[in-house]
């Protein structure tokens, strides 16, 4: 894992070095630059050494012929097979033992078609010195990030992280309020736009080409999931194949020249990965679990994972690092948002960062994660809610309306177990009268457009009038060829997964120089599972059905049949008590007027409603706080200065 950056335009001395500096946390082991002043091209690379720790694997790397130059962030898991083919067919002589040179020489001989043969996670840029063309590609699932913009007509600026783009001093910093509306609703922006108006993500499974002849950017897909391919095999044979694919994925993602460990939450996904990986490794394998004092959980009432994680690690007799924290959230948030680049409104970034930090301090450089299982197999509670409410559709319309109206009066933010139960029941029932697709997006959203509209400045509210925060996501659902529940899995997989979960995990682990790998998003697994019938994944209230069956005999039954807990954090308690001073600061009259994005009275209303327990608007408060602290870093301050 590394950080890459590049620029096409009039070169200034030291510019690409500044881009490297702003991403140095991603690559503490190496720093490289390639410049071609005649072509106006500069490429930068900071290196986190995982495979071939020698200087022979340093980047930017020039091909054997001297024609191509590559910068690469990621891992190619099938590089040994690809290397053997290149040696046999073309007589390639490799100087290094890692995957970068294999990727470079493969692209030199097969062109962009070679991308489809890669099994891995990646973002890379390939400069053709002869044709003066640039090829950029991002892995099919979107594990590794890549941002780009056009600073001047005909030019191009790209990097693994947005902050590096601001090394270009004339780059505009203008907020994108449509994206911010999505951040306030669901914690992330959808599609390929970002919270900056002129900066975009390269989408998963996409290539970007720049040609000196046209001086234009061309983007096209090389891979897309279908979620509509009929699986002609039986459930049992698919189950056996799935078990084999999971084992193979874990085994090949253990390949590393540095220590490997895992995130162990105590849930199904991380336990399955940890058990398979630990039994594969002959070396010490460290598992890391984060937990909060029970006094922190008085309001949020999230399910405690720690006892399950502890029992697993004891049975393995592997090193288990239990991190019990009560973080100073107020001091952590702003520097973490600098690393995030975008105002991702998810308290899980704190736990992800702290676990990665502890892993690095303990000498573990690569961490395996269970991410991706919920999007592939349908593990989120919203699928259970959709099934439950779907059954209630059989009731007369007047009765459904009465239930939804009554649910709106349930208190939503009371402390204790019954408060949490009422909050969840209210959330499910209040959407009973919505059309199916909008109901699903309501369950995906922490905050409604009505509540968001109440806190926005009137001018911004007017600009967004008629636009829903769910518009882009609804378009994704409607464009899916599947007409059953797979269309909702499709939305989660192509939007929520890369733009939220994978994004924050990459940023938080790379903030401390740790590589996060995702075996359950191995391409053989992805291709198999996306072709399965929806009922094999979600059957009534039974989520992740075939994955649970695949885990039988590996994971203890008590974990297989546990309810999903999620990557919980006591953010409601933090906001109600610990962050009172910070909330008052960011919502003061002076602060709100200076920003010009929010409405003072609207912010007071959501605070008082939550504090009284009548409404659960704490996630909206968290999102507001995130957006304001992000704006202070990227608009008020200088984002090229590390906090």
Image: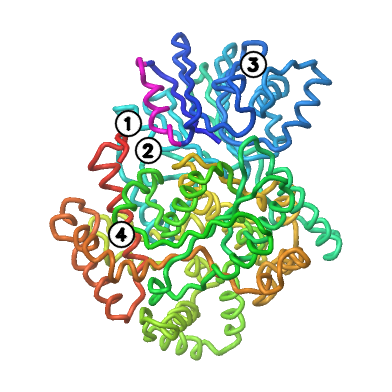
> Disc 1 vs disc 2: Cβ atoms closer than 8 Å?
yes
Q: Residue at x 39, y 83 (%)?
A: 408
- Can you tell which quarter of the image residue 610 is in? bottom left
Q: Nearer the viewer, mark 4 or mark 1?
A: 4
On residue 63, the disc is 3
Residue segment shown in magenta = 12-25
Residue 24 falls within the magenta-colored stretch = yes
Q: CA distance from mark 4 to mark 1?
A: 25 Å
Q: Nearer the viewer, mark 3 or mark 2?
A: 3
On residue 171, the disc is 1
Q: In the rendered image, which residue does mark 2 sit on?
A: 198
| Sequence-first tag of 3 and 4 | 3
> Disc 1 vs disc 3: Cβ atoms closer than 8 Å?
no
Dot 1: within a 10 Å radius of its alpha carbon, few (fewer than 14), some, or many (20 or more) residues? some
Front-most of 303 and 359?
359
Q: CA distance from mark 1 to mark 2?
A: 9 Å
Give the residue furthest to the left: 590
Q: CA distance from mark 4 to mark 2?
A: 22 Å
On residue 624, the disc is 4
**Label 1: which secondary element:** loop
| Sequence-first tag of 1 and 3 | 3
- Look at the magenta stretch and give its main secondary structure: helix
């Amino acid at each position: 894992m590394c950080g890459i950056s590049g620029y096409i335009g009039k070169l200034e001395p030291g510019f690409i070095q500044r881009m490297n500096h702003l991403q140095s946390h991603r690559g503490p082991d190496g720093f490289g630059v390639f410049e071609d002043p005649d072509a106006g091209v500069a490429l930068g690379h900071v290196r986190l050494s995982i495979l071939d720790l020698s200087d022979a694997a340093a980047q930017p790397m020039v091909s054997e012929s001297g024609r191509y130059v590559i910068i690469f962030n990621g891992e190619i898991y099938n590089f040994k097979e690809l290397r053997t083919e290149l040696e046999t067919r073309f007589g390639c002589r490799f100087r290094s033992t890692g995957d970068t040179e294999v990727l470079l020489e493969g692209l030199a001989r097969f062109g962009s078609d070679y991308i489809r043969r890669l099994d891995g996670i990646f973002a890379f840029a390939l400069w053709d010195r002869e044709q003066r063309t640039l090829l950029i590609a991002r892995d099919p699932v979107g594990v590794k990030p890549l941002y780009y913009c056009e600073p001047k007509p005909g030019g191009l600026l790209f990097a693994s992280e947005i902050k590096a783009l601001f090394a270009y001093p004339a780059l505009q910093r203008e907020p994108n309020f449509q994206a911010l509306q999505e951040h306030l609703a669901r914690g992330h922006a959808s599609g390929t736009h970002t919270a900056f108006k002129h900066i975009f993500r390269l989408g998963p499974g996409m290539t970007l080409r720049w040609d000196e002849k046209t001086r234009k950017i061309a983007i096209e897909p090389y891979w897309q999931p279908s979620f509509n391919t009929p699986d002609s095999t039986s459930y049992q044979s698919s189950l056996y194949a799935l078990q084999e694919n999971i084992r193979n994925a874990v085994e090949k993602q253990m390949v590393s020249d540095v220590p490997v460990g895992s995130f162990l939450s105590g849930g199904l996904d991380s336990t399955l990965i940890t058990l398979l990986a630990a039994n594969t490794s002959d070396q010490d394998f460290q598992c890391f679990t984060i937990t909060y004092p029970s006094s922190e959980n008085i309001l949020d009432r999230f399910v405690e994972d720690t006892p399950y994680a502890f029992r697993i690690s004891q049975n393995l007799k592997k090193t288990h690092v239990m991190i019990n924290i009560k973080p100073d959230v107020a001091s952590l948030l702003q520097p973490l948002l600098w690393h995030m680049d975008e105002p991702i409104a998810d308290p899980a970034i704190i736990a992800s960062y702290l676990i990665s930090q502890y892993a690095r301090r303990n000498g573990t450089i690569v961490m395996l994660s269970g991410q991706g299982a919920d999007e592939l197999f349908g593990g989120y509670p919203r699928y259970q809610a959709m099934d439950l409410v779907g059954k209630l559709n059989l009731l007369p319309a007047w009765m459904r309306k009465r239930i939804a109206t009554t649910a709106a009066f349930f208190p939503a933010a009371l402390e204790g177990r019954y408060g949490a139960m009422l909050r969840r029941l209210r959330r499910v029932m209040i959407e009973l009268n919505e059309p199916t697709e909008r109901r699903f997006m309501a369950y995906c959203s922490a905050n409604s457009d009505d509540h968001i509209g109440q806190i926005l400045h009137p001018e911004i509210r007017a600009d967004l009038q008629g636009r829903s925060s769910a518009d882009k996501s609804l378009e994704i659902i409607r464009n899916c060829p599947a007409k059953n529940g797979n269309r909702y899995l499709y939305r989660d997989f192509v939007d929520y997964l890369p733009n939220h979960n994978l994004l924050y995990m990459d940023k938080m682990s790379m903030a401390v120089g740790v590589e996060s790998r995702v075996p359950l998003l191995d391409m053989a697994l992805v291709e198999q599972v996306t072709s399965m019938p929806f009922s094999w994944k979600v059957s009534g209230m039974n989520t992740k059905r075939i994955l649970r069956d695949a885990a039988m005999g590996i994971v203890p039954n008590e974990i297989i049949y546990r309810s999903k807990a999620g990557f919980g954090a006591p953010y409601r308690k933090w906001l109600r008590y610990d962050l009172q001073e910070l909330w008052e600061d960011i919502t003061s009259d002076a602060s709100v007027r200076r920003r010009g994005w929010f409405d003072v009275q609207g912010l007071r209303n959501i605070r008082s409603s939550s504090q009284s327990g009548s409404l659960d608007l704490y996630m909206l408060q968290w999102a507001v706080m995130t957006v304001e602290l992000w704006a202070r870093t990227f608009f008020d301050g200088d984002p090229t200065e590390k906090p």
